[in-house]
Image (tube, helix red, strand yellow):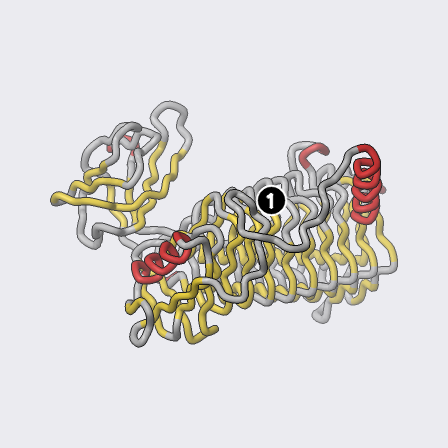
Amino acid sequence: MRRRNFLAAISVAASASAQNEPEAPRVTHARATFGDRIEPNWEQRVSISVGPEKADLVGSDHRAIQAAVDYVAGLGGGTVQILPGTYKLRNAVFLRSGVRICGSGLNTVLIKEPSVKTTLAENSDWYDMEVTLADASGFQVGDGVVLRTRNPHNGSHDTYKRTLVARSGNRFKLDQMLVENYWVKEGATAATLFAIFDGYRITDVSIENICLDGNRANNDFLNGNYVGCVFVRESSNIRFRKVTARNFNGDGISWQVCHDVRVEDCHSHDNAGYGVHPGSGSQRSVVTGSRLDQNDIGFFFCWGAKWSLVEKNTMTGNKRFGISVGHNDTDNVIRHNEVLRSGKFGVYFRQEHGPTFSPNRNRLEDNRIVDSGAEDGVAVEVEGQTQSVAIVRNTLVETRQPASRIGVRIGRETKNITLADNRIDGFSIPVQDLRQT
């Protein structure tokens, strides 16, 4: 079903519902009432500033910012203004519902301190709230850590984030129980890794006009299912505006199972993972006016990312793909973007485990895709059993030699792939349809 048809269906369903079920009158004069999300449009709310000097809370690390966030959240929400300066973090700033965080653009820099890593010296079981480190140098009480191990029962790998809250020598108490077994014989480790901003089950949060630096050269890699410059999970109504997310040894901006996330006028660049990563199960993301440069992948749709709009963004020099769409990522619109100088494919519809898992019913329209890949690069690659994808009015250009480069390549098992009104110039093969071979 196309997006306009879907919206029309919603409208029809809503009309039918309105005819069959009575509705309460619309609120025109709201009052603050316990338990009611509808409130007056207050002219002033709680606001507190954080800075190295001359601020409501004076400090230049995660503790000062966290104190401001918690204070504002405790009073029902408001704004934390982070003044110009460089803030060095040994743990994430944990986001709270109803809090707006504002910086001063590139003059407000939150930078992650270098990571340290060690093995565990003693076994810890799943119910424990402590670990003993083989080498505790570089670890402090208050640090954010990631604990990783091979699972002794099924051979998988377990990764959990915790905070060190107490210490005796090499023995540290954790803020939460371990949940899994961390045994020496399975190579259990601890490392000071964390997101710069971390949110879990929050709503109505905004991060604006700030620079987040992951200090990539001095930190271990950890993928965007756990951390990033920003990492939010199981949340809704989140907005990132004019955020610079750079140099993280992982993702720039990542969210998992989050709905109605907006990314506006942001710059995510030079991250080892993905520039923007709408993660598993996320619905109705809107990403617009942003630059995603020199990441591994510019924009990565994870599992089941649906009903999203990716519009008027520029993705330049990403190592593998400008945009990647895959496992059950359906009903998304990708339009009016520039995808430039991608390392392998400009836009990639991934091969998945059969048609019900494929990136179906997506629309790629009015994009400009230039100079994709090496001599065998492809501007738009559609693989697997992908179905019902529309590729219309795009400009695909190769300014280098044609070599073995392809404009659009359509896989043998795909179905209902629509190509219409595209301009395809400079390729050895403008369209390669493997269904016909």
Q: Residue 292 placed where, x, y %?
A: 57, 63
Task: Quadrant for the N terminus, please.
Answer: top right
Q: Which residue is mark 1?
A: 282
Residue pictured at 33% horizontal, 36% vertical: 149
Q: Is residue 29 visible?
A: yes
Q: Residues within 10 Å of mark 1 (few under 14, many from 20)?
A: many
Tell whether 80 sits left or right of 337: left
**Mark 1 belongs to which amino acid?**
Ser
Tell whether 95 sits left or right of 52: right
Which of the two residues, 81 or 340, is positioned nearer the viewer here?
81
Tell whether 79 sits left or right of 364: left
Which of the two residues, 254 or 142, is positioned nearer the viewer here?
142
Q: Is residue 269 above or below residue 71?
A: below
**Figure quadrant of residue 172:** top left
Q: Is residue 31 above or below residue 81?
A: above
Residue pictured at 43% horizontal, 65% vertical: 47
Q: Residue furthest left?
A: 169
Secondary structure under the numbered disc 1 in the rendered image: loop
